[in-house]
Amino acid sequence: MEQPEGFSAPGQEGKVCKLVKSLYGLKQAPKQWHQKFDQVMLNNGFKINECDKCVYVKNTMRGYVILCLYVDDMLIVGSDDKMIKSTKDMLKARFDMKDMGLADVILGIKINRTQYGLVLSQSHYVDKILEKFNEGDTSVAQTPVDTTQHLSKNRGEGVAQLEYSRIIGSLMYLMTCTRPDLAYAASRLSRYTSNPSSEHWKGMTRLLRYLRYTINYGLHYGRDPAVIEGYSDANWISDMKDSKSTSDYVFTLGGAAIAWKSSKQTLIARSTMESEFIALDKAGEEAEWLRQFVEEVPGWPKPTSAICIHCDCQSAIGRAQSAMYNGKSRHIRRRHNTIRQLLSMGVISIDYVRSKDNIADPFTKGLSRELVHKSSRGMGLKPFEQVCTKENIS
């Protein structure tokens, strides 16, 4: 490190300081921090979840403790109060940390406790977005996407590109954490961040108006049995310019979404079946990770059952369950073999669901307000009371 200004050694101004420990902001700092934290946790009887290296588990005859780490923010879950307290005391002895008590807000996500379960929301963050980017507009929209609007690449001069990209960044964080209903709209609008036009701004304004209409939405997790369910869907050739389809999946637990994704496919599908099969392959990939993750969670029912993925394309389901070779589908052979292996190993099962009951449908295209409302409820997205009194916090 260069010698600090005003503290350079006389006659040795050309020399540099050798660091004896890492400083915040250096490229090596994250690695050094995680190495140290891993060592402390392992020395105190914790094990690292192999599917997520930032989740630490300690399971004893008395109970269990799970610690989730995000940079330097921690969330501790446990079945025994004494084990939780001893974990906090151990961390306080090794690190300079502050105990924030019962989790109320973590990484900008507010946790509300009700008699029915938990509600995760970011209404305060939505307030900030609207105040910063859409303050003068008081209109609302009941759907995030205008089904009559078709966006294309802007060939002319861009309109407020920096402001557009800032809004996209804010919406991406909101969508990733607690608002799966924004996934398709945010993914669609983000494709034009480099050079947005007035038409793209119309789509952005509509999405912000939808946010105002659903400002008090949150993910409601109930006390249902620990069963993970998945839904996959695809929209064949959603982009007429490059002939690529949109695929998506959503997984639910306790009546609300826990994992979701909406993205343009990287290859051109030759039919609806192929686009649905590619989406099914991506959903199977996520299901395999989720199943391996919960297998290492103490208290999760053992043996871990197969995760059921609901698909609204019977031809894709038939292809997945068929072991016969067909020359027409040889270009998706690897995906077919992957799905077949997951089915034979009991990692996933595939079930048919009607399109109108597929809650992954809004991840691929714009829908009517009735279907948007129905799918949002299916993902556990509902309005909630923002006031959470101390009496109903357990």
Image: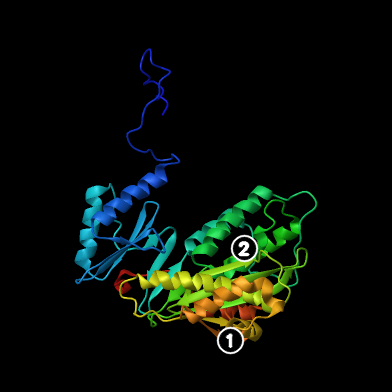
Q: Is residue 384 above or below residue 201?
A: below
| Residue under numbered circle 1 | 353
Q: Position of residue 166 (x, y in %)?
A: 60, 52
Q: Position of residue 139 (x, y in %)?
A: 64, 66
Q: Residue at x 48, y 61 (%)?
A: 124
For marks 2 and 1 on the same chain, the one whose residue lies earlier in the sequence: 2
Judge left or right: residue 235 versus residue 152.
left
Q: Residue at x 38, y 16 (%)?
A: 12
Where disc 1 sits, the SS reads loop
Q: Residue at x 27, y 60 (%)?
A: 46
The foreground one among 319 and 252 is 319
- The amino acid type, in three-letter code, at marker 2 is Ala
Instruction: Point out the image quarter for the N terminus.
Output: top left
Which corner quadrant of the image does residue 193 belong to? bottom right
Judge left or right: residue 227 versus residue 87.
right
Q: Position of residue 24 (x, y in %)?
A: 40, 40
Instruction: Point out the image quarter for the C terminus.
Output: bottom left
Q: Is residue 162 above or below residue 235?
A: above
Q: Which mark is residue 186?
A: 2
Query: How many numbered discs sit on the rendered protein?
Result: 2
The foreground one among 348 and 301 is 348
Cβ–Cβ under 8 Å for marks 2 and 1: no
Q: Which mark is residue 112?
A: none
Name the residue furthest top: 11
Mark yes or no: residue 193 visible: yes
The foreground one among 361 and 266 is 266
Q: Position of residue 280 (x, y in %)?
A: 59, 75
Which corner quadrant of the image does residue 120 belong to? bottom left
Mark yes or no: residue 142 visible: no
- The amino acid type, in three-letter code, at marker 1 is Val
**From the viewer's perspective, is the residue at label 2 or at label 1 nearer?**
1
Q: Is residue 145 above or below residue 317?
A: above
